[in-house]
Amino acid sequence: MGEHVIRTYTSEKQEGFKSWPGGPQKPEVLPVAKGVNRFTWDFRKEGLPAVDGVFAFGDYRGGFVSPGDYALR
């Protein structure tokens, strides 16, 4: 099977991010402090794109990935 990206995280804060009631959650940012850092992946795929000002009943988070072997780079 070919390799493909399921989810991407970054250590840079997203400039200009805004939310609203029923809107997307603030994106998680990887810690980069000196020493040991910890980050936990919630086993979800990339979230749905937000449409400015549109209320989503439920949330914008992506669905869970299927059981399997995953690699982190």
Image: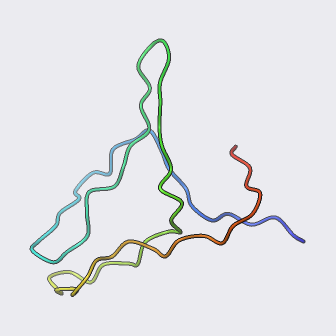
Among the 4 quarters of the image, the one containing residue 43: bottom right
Depicted 61 relative to depicted 11: above or below:
below
Q: Residue 73 or 42: which is nearer the viewer?
A: 42
Depicted 33 relative to depicted 60: above or below:
above
Q: Residue at x 74, y 66 (%)?
A: 4
Q: Residue at x 75, y 63 (%)?
A: 68
Among the 4 quarters of the image, the one containing residue 34: top left
Across and down, in percent, residue 37 comes to: 47, 24
Across and down, in percent, residue 59 comes to: 28, 77
Picture quarter with the C terminus: top right
- Residue at the extreme top of the image, as rendered: 35
Q: Residue at x 27, y 84 (%)?
A: 51
- Residue at the extreme right of the image, as rendered: 1
Q: Residue at x 53, y 71 (%)?
A: 64
Depicted 68 relative to depicted 40: above or below:
below
Across and down, in percent, residue 42 comes to: 47, 56
- Residue at the extreme left of the image, as rendered: 21
Picture quarter with the N terminus: bottom right
Q: In the rendered view, does 61 fall on the left or right side of 73?
A: left
Q: In the rendered view, does 54 fall on the left or right side of 8?
A: left
Q: In the rendered view, does 56 fall on the left or right side of 65?
A: left
Q: How is the image coloured?
A: rainbow
Depicted 50 relative to depicted 14: above or below:
below
Q: In the rendered view, does 27 fall on the left or right side of 56?
A: right
Across and down, in percent, residue 23 comes to: 19, 74
Number of numbered tags placed on the structure image: 0
